[in-house]
Amino acid sequence: MAALATPSRTPASAGAAELRLTRAAPAKATPIVAAVNDSSASSGVVETAVRLAAELNLQLVFVYVRRGPPGFLGRPFFQRRLTAKMTRARRAVDRALSAAVHAGVDAEGEILEGAPRKRILQLASDRDARLIVVGSRRRRFSRSVSRGVLRAAEGPVVVARSRPLLADVR
């Protein structure tokens, strides 16, 4: 922690400047938020986010956003579906955390429920994230989460691919 010297005038000293040492508050670490899931695009997100966090010496927050199972399924079916989704979520976050630990990066994981685009942006805003890393995969009939995050984010967004663009070109 650095000490900060601030000159101040006190009424008792009548014009003499007094040098008072105060401790500067540590700068709030702004993390990198990386959205992971159980798809093949998630490996590119983990690799890119870990590399960026190591290079920038930042903390890393992996987030898995799941949509809740429909309530009309009934109690035993709802619970089975919820258990399966939570197992997939934990597996994806654990893989990402182990990659971060292997690279020596400080990381944590969160599992959230809701609309992925909204929840990723909300977490990044709450944590005052330096940047967001999302994956890119081809979606045929539904909206792309990465495109939604890219359009609505207030800060920089990195869209990671699962394989390099020029890997096949020689």
Image (tube, grey):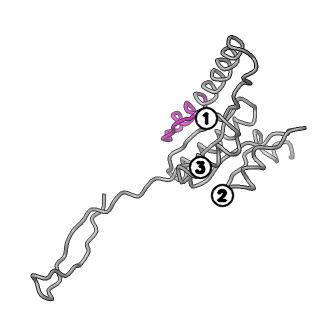
Q: Quadrant of residue 71?
A: top right
SS at mark 1 in the image: strand
SS at mark 2 in the image: loop
Front residue of this view, candidates 115 and 147: 115
Mark 3 belongs to which amino acid? Ala
Q: Is residue 25 left or right of residue 157?
A: left
In the image, residue 68 lies at what x, y percent? 69, 28
Disc 2 marks which residue?
Answer: 156
Q: Residue at point 58% right, 52% down? A: 125
Q: CA distance from mark 3 to mark 1?
A: 13 Å
Magenta stretch, residue numbers: 95-110
Mark 2 belongs to which amino acid? Pro
In the image, residue 166 lies at what x, y percent? 82, 47
Q: Which mark is residue 112?
A: 1
Mark 1 belongs to which amino acid? Leu
**What quarter of the picture does the N terminus occupy?**
bottom left
